[in-house]
């Protein structure tokens, strides 16, 4: 996860910074990583069970689970990107504080930290955000995805 820009808190199992994947979206390496993550989540497709699995956490550490949260964020971003036909882009800071709705669908970089049990809430902005959300949900619940809602996986 270092290659993507995740920054781990030196004192605890938590991310202090998470990337927007801007330079990686759609690249062969990113697609390959997303496919590996998807394979993992086909085997571990219930978040409540996964986050309580002793294989991924102990009384003293949840580092493995922290990496799973990063992988989940990577997969979600990849699925959104592919479901948008490669049109999804991260939000950029707007010095002018322009409030118009963008034509392309955009997503904000996660703000704040994330623990090893954090959920990843997706925020989409743009005129087709609702349509992309529907496609994303249909993918996760369909035969190509996991057959269940993303919040369960």
Image: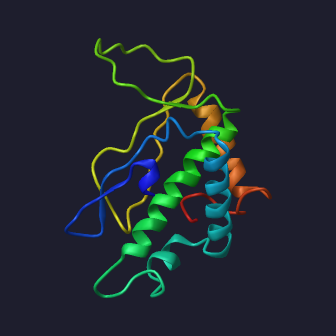
- At 63% from the left and 49% from the top, the residue drawn is 29
Q: Position of residue 150 (x, y in %)?
A: 59, 57
- At 64% from the left and 41% from the top, the residue drawn is 27
Q: Is residue 51 left or right of residue 10?
A: right
Q: Position of residue 94 (x, y in %)?
A: 33, 18
Q: Is residue 97 left or right of residue 41?
A: left
Which image quarter: residue 56? bottom left
Which image quarter: residue 110? top left
Q: Position of residue 91 (x, y in %)?
A: 43, 28
Quadrant of image for the N terminus = bottom left
Which image quarter: residue 2? bottom left
118 versus 130 height, above or below = below
Q: Position of residue 81 (x, y in %)?
A: 62, 39
- At 68% from the left and 67% from the top, the residue drawn is 39
Closer to us: 71 or 137: 71
Closer to us: 3 or 19: 3
120 versus 55 height, above or below = above
Quadrant of image for the C terminus = bottom right
């Amino acid at each position: 996860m270092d290659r993507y820009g995740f920054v781990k808190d030196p004192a605890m199992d938590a991310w202090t910074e998470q990337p927007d994947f801007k330079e990686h979206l759609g690249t062969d390496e990113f697609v390959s990583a997303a496919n590996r993550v998807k394979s993992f989540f086909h085997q571990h497709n219930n978040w409540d069970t996964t986050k309580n699995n002793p294989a991924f956490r102990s009384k003293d550490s949840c580092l493995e689970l922290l990496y799973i949260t990063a992988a989940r964020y990577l997969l979600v971003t990849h699925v959104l990107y592919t479901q948008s036909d490669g049109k999804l882009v991260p939000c950029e800071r707007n010095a002018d504080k322009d409030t118009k709705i963008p034509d392309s669908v955009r997503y904000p970089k996660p703000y704040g930290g994330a623990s090893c049990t954090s959920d990843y809430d997706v925020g989409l902005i743009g005129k087709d955000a609702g349509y992309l959300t529907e496609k994303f949900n249909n993918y996760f619940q369909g035969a190509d995805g996991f057959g269940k809602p993303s919040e369960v996986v």
